[in-house]
Image (tube, grey):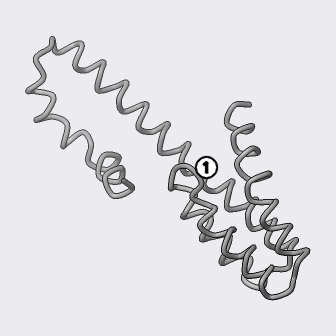
Amino acid sequence: MLVGLDYFLLGGRRMAAPVLGLVPMDARYTARFASEFRGVTYALAWGLGLTALEQAVLGTAGMLVAGVPAALLEGVAMGVTALIPSGGTAIVWVPVGLALLLSGRWRAGLFVLAWGPCWCPPWTTWCARG
């Protein structure tokens, strides 16, 4: 998905010209459709990127509070996995929380397992709507 988005953002006009010539609509409608499509694509790219950044920052903050040794690395991993729909950051914070529980750090483990689903996604949803 990211590779395709990169191609669309960098070479979209050059790629779209031959395709738009095949669309069986009047040229003015095709141009308006292409303009709207471009706007939606840019908005989607910015929205995904900023949401991933926001979840990475919140996840890193939670890991730092819990005292996770590699909190910055875990935060970067959350930023990358935040691009996966429907709970991508859980790929990071669930194993970290379970590892903390299994290593005997109950408070830190429970905190991470509570922080992930209760703070990161609701906060980013609230910011996106606000």
The residue under the point 64% across, 56% down is: 53
Quarter in which the C terminus is drawn: top right
**Residue 74 occupies which quadrant of the picture?**
bottom right
Determine whether the residue tagged by mark 1 lies in a helix, strand or loop.
helix
**Other-residue count near label 1 (Cα within 10 Å), few / some / many at <14 / 14–19 / ≥20:** some
In depth, the one of 67 and 97 nearer the eye is 97
Residue at the farthest right position = 107
- Residue 69 in percent (x, y) is at 77, 85
Q: Position of residue 120 (x, y in %)?
A: 74, 53
Who's the residue at 66% across and 74% down the image?
Answer: 95
Residue 94 placement: quadrant: bottom right
Residue named by callout 1: 50
Task: Looking at the picture, tell me which residue is in the foreground, 77 or 39.
Answer: 77
The residue under the point 61% across, 49% down is: 50
Image coordinates of residue 9 in percent, x first then y, are 35, 46
| Amino acid marked by disc 1 | Leu
Q: Name which quarter of the figure residue 70 lies in.
A: bottom right
The residue at the point 32 percent across, 50 percent down is 10
Decide: is 7 above or below 23.
below
